[in-house]
Amino acid sequence: MTPVNFNIFKLPTPSAIFKLTMPSVGATSITDAAAAAANQDPDLQRLLAKVERIGATTRRLDSVSNSSVAIGNGSNSSSAGLEPVLADARSLSEMIRCTSELADRVSSKVRQLDCAKSRVTAGLQRVEDIIDLKACTDGVQKALQDEDYEIAAAHIHRYLTLDETVMRMTADASEGSTLEASFEVLHKSEAVLKDIVHKQFDLAVQRQDRASIERFFKIFPLLNLHQAGLEKLGGYLGGCLREQCEKARIAASSAAGQDGGAWAAQQLLQLYEAVAASVEVHQPLVETFYGPGHLFGLLQVLQNEVDAQAKRIVDRFRSLRDLDSRVRLARTSATRHQQSQQQYGPGSQAQMMYQQQQQQGQQLDAKQLDAVLSELAVLSSRTELYLRFVSRRCLADWAAADSKGGGSGGGAASGAADSESESVEQRRQRKLDDFLGKCAVTRCIQKLVDEYCLLEEHFMREMLAKAVALDSGVGGSDPTDTRLADDAFFILKKCLRRAVSTGSADATCAALNRAADVAEAQLIGALRSRLGRGFPSGWVQDAFGSKASVEEARQAYLTALNCAEACRGNLRDLRRLLESDTTSGAGRRDREKLLSCLQAMDAGLGEALAAIVNEGVECLTEISLRPQVKQILAPLSNVSHVITEEELLAYEASDPWVEAACLRIGQLADGFQRLLLPPLFDTLLQSLAGELVLRAEKLIARKQFNRLGGLQLDREVRSLAACLSARAAWSVRDRLARLSQTAMLLGLESLDELTACWSDSVMAWRLTPAEVRHVLALRVDFRQDDLRQHGRCLDSLQN
């Protein structure tokens, strides 16, 4: 290489530079610059003195003007004193004109000073660049000869920061050949150093020399080869991953009795942990020598090897678990189930035909399928964790790059760039999502998740069908045994929590939707079919069958009804559990999607179960309670309520019918309390209260009363309320409100009390004005004219 002669460069001497240097270089205002320039220019000094004199004159004129205004306000005779003010104003105008001209001259001087300062700064910078160019030219040659590649790279890096084009344009004719020689030397040195760094890095990788690998990796950014350095390091780390996976595969194949699913999950976990460890180790190195924001480039290169190794692991898992044949059988089973549902509708017949078709073909072993599903969930969850790790690290690295790059910006500048930064963040997020969504490991695991959803649906359908079949053969004597509801929701809880453990929001939503469909077809369909047979009344079945068969049918009906009610409670518990599982660790969009699917499943199954329970209770009420209520309240129609005081006292000592009625109501309620679950018993007790009110109102409407008879009726209604309150967990007063208000009206002493009672804001009337008039008409001691008059009063109060 030819040495460069820098003596021909004609640089300004220090004395010449000093002459161009002025004190006003750092001035921040026109006044300061003018004051600094006045020390060197006598004309400027005289002009500034004149400005000071003009300012003093202006201040004096202001005081004179203020005095003139005050005098003018005091007396009209002092107007002659304004003549001097006018003269002073004219003088002030002339001074202002002179001041303006003087300011223009000062500004011109300041502009000249700024131009001189810029030229001096440019000259100094050119001197520094030439000195750096000389140092780089000499230093890079010596460093290459000494094989000190870090120093050589530092010289090349400094040379690359110089503006070669500007230096060529500003060079003199005598400087041109020397500059060209320097640039030629640096260009050749740059090419030589790049070639050396590439070769030495590859040689270090072959030797597995980590120190040399890090050494030459640090040199790439000095040569503006950031991407090349990241690709080199990514290739090296990918090779390390490949070796680790190969060693693990050989160790697993040589181990006796190694389970295929456990091997795949362990291998995938080790692969992802190795990537995470590489990031932890090398991210500080990348940030230090390449700067923040380059981690994504490294992971892009490394992901190629991760995709290849993950695909190899998954393919081996599919082979060991015979996943393709299992998926094919699950699809065939789903088709059979759909055909049976379309042909026979949901219910026991469709389930029976489906079971027969399943027995004729090849079936999946539920125990083995359960293990496969758990392994698929583990594979998915670990992949989701890995993808979240990559996303989190890349976003944090970009955020660090933004904070480092924008740390010196002012508040106004940062505020003006908010929308632009948001768009940059959105573009980065979209770029990251596209990269992670299109990588091979994501596509591979997504296929496994789709197959998992199909197999999970098959598992739920088969297990629920088996639970229903086993429960139909149980002949226990306890109707409160809700084994079917417990078994069914244990299966649903297990499957849905396993779906949540996959870490995939799409898989969880699909499992929730399919769980609702399977439970509707298998569980609710079976309960609806059993309750559809009705509750046996007794006498019809006794005529055509044995007493044991009637009792067995009643037990089956009550068991199915209890199971439906237990399913409602289990559904509420399942929703609370899944809400806790799905909302922890999920993003906002995923959380909203999961909660929406969970609410849809809860609403669909909850409404179906509520309809079954209501229909079952209504059937039980119609067949069992209503005839009993008629018999219990039958004595009411035979008891007179137009009585004397002696008869009232006799009724109090020996009740004619209500004590016996309360006894029978208690026996009826206690009998069902032993056969029904507490929530279901409360519902049935409410139906019993409603039947008592309806029947009692019909009987009361056919009777006549006097005031004492109304008091007796009120006593009887209170006895019925006390009987029900002893067994109910709800307010009996609300259920018997109409009956209590009827008894109160019949016990009024006079019609004048009616207006006060009706206007009472504390009482919420359940009777309409028409019904009140009808009740009062049952009193034999009230005149019809009085009833009509008070009826009009009620209508006016109602309006």
Image (cartoon, rainbow, N blue to C red):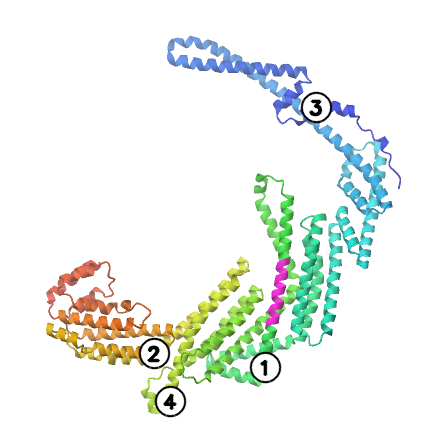
- Does the CB distance between marks 2 and 1 fall below 8 Å? no
Looking at the rendered structure, the kind of residue marked 4 is Ala
> Which residue position holds label 3?
22
Among numbered discs 1 and 4, the one appearing first in the sequence? 1
Residue drawn at (63%, 60%) of the image: 387
Residue 305 image point, x, y percent: 72, 62
User: Which SS class for mark 1?
Assistant: loop
The verdict on residue 375 being magenta is yes
Cα–Cα span, label 2 and label 1 = 43 Å
Cα–Cα span, label 1 and label 3 = 98 Å
Looking at the rendered structure, the kind of residue marked 2 is Phe
The verdict on residue 275 being magenta is no
> Which residue position holds label 4?
548
Among numbered discs 2 and 3, the one appearing first in the sequence? 3
Residue 381 image point, x, y percent: 60, 65
> Which residue position holds label 2?
672
Say few, some or many: other residues with alpha carbon within 10 Å of mark 3 (under 14 / 14 to 19 / 20 or more). Answer: some
Asked whether residue 531 is in view, the answer is: no
Among numbered discs 2 and 4, the one appearing first in the sequence? 4
Please provide the residue range marked out in magenta: 374-389
